[in-house]
Amino acid sequence: MEFDWRLYFSLASELAAEGTEQAYRAAISRAYYAVFGTARQLLEQQGYHLTHTAGIHHQVWYIYRTSHHREMQRAYPLAAYLRDLRNQADYDPVMINLPNIWENVYHKAYSFFSIVDERLKPQVKSLHGD
C-alpha cells in the first residue's frame, strides 16, 4: 500500500501547535512534502515516468506548470509558494513572523489538496487527454 503523504500535513499541524521556531520550521517543511508527495503520486498513478533523482521536484512542478489541464495549472502556484517557504524554513538562518507564515502555508496546502480532491482525481483520465 502506498504511503499517504497527507499524513505529513497532519504531522505539520501537530508540530506547529508546539509554537516553537523549530516546530514551525519543521511544520512548513512537512506541509510542503505532503503536497509534493501527493502531487508526485498522482502523476505516477496516471502513468508519468519520473526519474527519482535530485531533480524530481523540478520534474513534478514542470508538469503541473505546463499542463493543459486547468486545475493542474491552478495548483502549481500554491506548490511553488510552499516550495519557496520550505527552502527558507530549511536553510535561512532568520525567519520572521513564523506563526503567520505557518497560517499561510496551512491555507495554501489545504487549497492544493482541495483542488486535487475535488477537481483532479475525478477527471484523472483527462490528464493525458484520454
Image: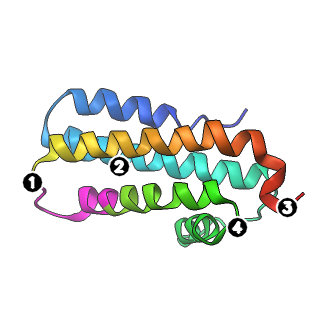
Q: Which residue is mark 3?
A: 129
Q: Could you tell me the amino acid type at mark 4?
A: His
Percent position (x, y) of residue 60? 60, 64
Contact (CB < 8 A) between labels 4 and 1?
A: no
Of mark 3 and mark 4, the one earlier in the sequence is: 4
In this view, 125 is above or below 63: above
- Where disc 3 sits, the SS reads loop
Percent position (x, y) of residue 69? 69, 60
> Mark 2 or 1, which is nearer the eye?
1
Disc 1 from disc 3: Cα separation: 44 Å
- Residue 68 bears which disc, if any? 4
Residues packed near mark 3 inside 10 Å, few (<14), some (14 to 19) or many (20 plus): few
> Mark 3 or 2, which is nearer the eye?
3
Q: Which residue is mark 2?
A: 29
Residues packed near mark 1 inside 10 Å, few (<14), some (14 to 19) or many (20 plus): few
Disc 2 from disc 1: Cα separation: 16 Å
Of residues 79 and 17, the one nearer the viewer is 79
Q: Can you name the residue that lies furthest to the right here?
A: 130
The residue sitting at 66% across, 42% down in the picture is 119
- Where disc 1 sits, the SS reads loop
Disc 3 from disc 2: Cα separation: 33 Å
Q: Which residue is mark 1?
A: 96
- Where disc 4 sits, the SS reads loop
- Where disc 2 sits, the SS reads helix
Percent position (x, y) of residue 67? 67, 67
Question: Is 88 colored magenta in this rendering?
Answer: yes
Q: Can you name the residue that lies furthest to the front here?
A: 70
